[in-house]
Image (spheres, rainbow, N blue to C red):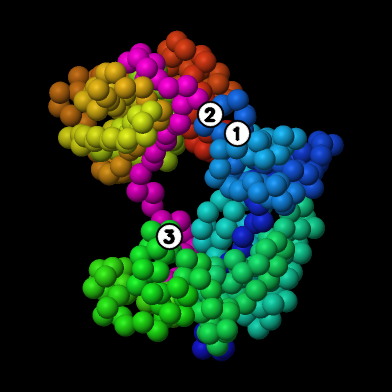
Amino acid sequence: MKDERVIFHVDVNSAFLSWTSVERLAHGESDLREIPAVIGGDVKKRHGVVLAKSIPAKAFGIHTGEPLTDAVRKCPDLISVPPDFQVYQRNSRAFKAICREYATAVQDFSIDECFLDVTQTTAFDHPLAAANEIKSRIKNELGFTVNVGIGPNKLLAKMAGDFEKPDKIHTLWRREIPAKMWPLDVGRLLSVGKKTSQKLNACGIWKIGDLAHCNLQGLKKIFGERQGAHLYAYANGWDDSPVLAAPREEKGYSVSITLPKNAETESEAKSVIKKLVDTVAMRLRSRKKRARRISVQIRYASFKDRSHQITLEEATDITKTIERAAYQLFDELWDQKTPLRLIGVSLSQIEGHAASQISMFDRGTNERERQIDAAIDAIRKRYGMDIINRGVADEKLPQVGRKYRAHFEIDRKK
C-alpha cells in the first residue's frame, strides 16, 4: 500500500433533505428524515420533481426524479418542501471545510460530494481511523451524515462510497476488486449509463467482471477507440486522474426553466427569455467573464427539443446585447404556434475581460449599458435579488436561475 495513493470520496447522505432538516431543526421544526418527506417544491406546479427523499418516503416506493404528483399519489400525507440552494451552499462549504483539514487537495465533485487526497497526510497511515473521524465530526458538528469511500484512486474511492448507505465507510483496494466490484451489475460502474449498460448486456456483458475480462479490441470496435478503452480501464479499476485542488475554469454558463404553464405567445416566451438572460448575464459578470457564443434552447409541449446558437464578433457581458441575440435566435427557432414547455439560454466560448476589445463603432453605447448593468448588480448585491427587475411586466412568471440566485445572495452576505 505504501506505493499507492490514498483517496477518500465523501458523499452527503440525502443531501438536500438532510440540509433542509438541519435548518428546520434549528428553527424548532420537524426532522424531515424521520417522516415521509421529499424535497421537490409545490405539488400544484407541473414541473415539480422529487429531488431527494427520506427513508420513510422510500418505503412508499417514491424515487428520486419522479414527478411530485406521482409521489403524492403513492403517499397522500407526503410532506414536500421546496429546495433552498442558499442553505445547501452553506452546508456544502461547511462539510468541505472539515475535509480540507485532513487532505493536501480537495476536489469538488458536486455540491454534496468531494474527493480528498490524503497520501501526504497522517490519514495515509490510518485511513479508516481518519475517515471515521471525518464522518463523526460532520455528524456531530453539522448535524448530517456522510458516506466515505476509500481507495487508491478516485474511481475506486467513489465506487466504494456507493456500496451501502447511509453513514458508512467502505474500502476498495486493488486486491478487493475481484470480491467487491467485479460481481456488481455492469450498470453500477461509474460513467456507465442506461444506454451503455443495455448495449453491454446485448453483448453478453452483465457484470463488471465480465467487462474487465472481455476482449479490448472487440470493445473498441463496438464502442469506439476512446470509449472502449475507457470502459475497459474502469472495469479493471485503473484511474490515474489527480485530485485537483483548484476548480477547472468554467466553460460556460446556462440556465433553463420548465414552465408551470406552457408559453403560447411570443410575449410570454420573451418575458421568460428576458429573465433568463438577466440571470445568466449577471452570473457571467460576477466571474469577470465575457461570452462570445449565445445559445437558446426550446422544448415544445410535444417534448421535441430545438436549439440554435450564434457566435458574436466580440465577446460580451452586456445584458442588452445578449438579450437581443437571444430574441433573434428564438425568432428563428419557434414555429409561432406550438406551445412551449421549456426555455433555456446558455453562454459559452468564455473569455476574460482583458481578451475583449471595444469596437470602433461602439460610440459609447456599450459603455453606457455596462454602467447600467453594474448599477443593477450593485443594488442587488446590497439589497437582494428581488429589489429590482428589468421591465418584466408579468410578475407571475416563475422564478428562474435559482442556482445563480443562491450564488449571488451568498456573495452579497460575505
Q: Which residues are magenta?
A: 240-269
Helix, strand or loop status at disc 1: helix
Check the picture and name the quadrant holding the N terminus.
bottom right
Q: Does 258 appear above or below 289?
A: above
- Percent across and percent down for residue 339 are 36, 22
Q: Does 76 appear above or below 132?
A: above
Q: Amino acid at mark 3?
A: Gly
Q: Given the current orientation, which residue lies at the most extreme right position?
A: 28
Asked if marks 1 and 2 touch (Cβ < 8 Å), the reply is yes
> What residue is rendered at 38% in x and 28% in y?
301
Helix, strand or loop status at disc 3: loop
Mark 2–mark 3 distance (CA, rounded to whole Å):
27 Å
Helix, strand or loop status at disc 2: loop
Name the residue tied to disc 2: 46
Would residue 123 appear left or right of 334 to someone viewing this image? Answer: right
Examine the structure image and report whether residue 91 is included in the region drawn in magenta.
no
Q: Amino acid at mark 1?
A: Thr
Q: Given the current orientation, which residue lies at the most extreme left position?
A: 360
Res. 261 in view = yes
Check the picture and name the quadrant holding the C terminus.
top right
- Quadrant in the rendering for residue 413: top right
Task: From the image, state whether disc 3 or disc 1 is nearer to you.
Answer: 1
Of mark 3 and mark 1, the one earlier in the sequence is 1
> What residue is rendered at 40% in x and 20% in y?
263
> What residue is rendered at 80% in x and 58% in y?
140
Name the residue tied to disc 1: 69
